[in-house]
Image (cartoon, grey):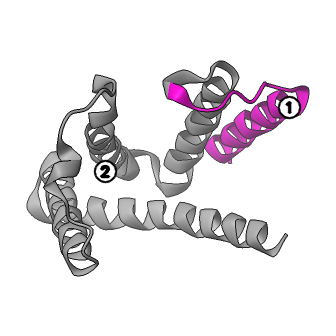
Amino acid sequence: MQARILLIVSALLLGAILPMQAAINSRLAKAIGSPVYAAFVSFAVGTIALFFYLVLTKQFNLQALQPKQNPWWIWIGGLLGTFFVAGIVMLLPRLGVVLAFSLVIAGQTIASVLFDQFGWLGVAVREISLGKIAGIILLITGVVMVRKF
């Protein structure tokens, strides 16, 4: 039970990092004049940090990058991340932090329910339930309230 609580708290803290990252990157975009360039700088800094972490922890292994009998799409996670970072940097000044992330969370939740229901990209199937549908409806209601008020 305590391990589960730690996982839940960790997920909440990771979620709290996203608006901070978006606000920082939005300020960077304003300073350098381009949201896409700001996303590039953000990913470059992150890549360098991860490289040093891998080297320091002796996990850096070029052999792991060899194509194997895996689907092609396992290599595009970083590409999707760049779309997210560049997109949120563009949206944040226009929508504000609360509305932008309310919409992001709603989109994530709806997509997550579909991924669980259909087992897309190899995730374990977890069937949709009335409770999940009610949660999505409440989430969308929350987005509408955030937008309206």
Image height of 127 relative to 27, above or below: above
Point out which mark residue 42 bears.
none
- The residue depicted at 46 percent of the width and 61 percent of the height is 19
CA distance separating discs 1 and 2 = 31 Å
| Residue 65, picture quadrant | top left
Q: In which quadrant is the N terminus drawn?
A: bottom right
Point out which mark residue 89 bears.
2
Mark 1 residue crowding within 10 angstroms, few (<14) / some (14–19) / many (20+): few
Q: What x and y, as percent, mark residue 117?
A: 70, 22
- The residue depicted at 20 percent of the width and 34 percent of the height is 67
Please state which amino acid type lies under the numbered disc 1.
Answer: Ala
Q: Is residue 6 in sight in this rendering?
A: yes
Point out which mark residue 134 bears.
1
Q: What x and y, as percent, mark residue 87?
A: 32, 41
Q: What x and y, as percent, mark residue 62?
A: 14, 54
Camera-nearest residue between 71 and 145: 71
Residue lying furthest bottom in this view? 56
Q: Nearer the viewer, mark 1 or mark 2?
A: 1
Q: Is residue 35 in sight in this rendering?
A: no
**Is 139 inside the magenta-drawn segment?**
yes
Residue range (magenta): 122-149
Camera-nearest residue between 82 and 137: 82
Camera-nearest residue between 88 and 81: 81
Image height of 19 relative to 58, above or below: above
Main SS of the magenta segment? helix
| Residue 48, picture quadrant | bottom left
Sequence-earlier tag: 1 or 2:
2
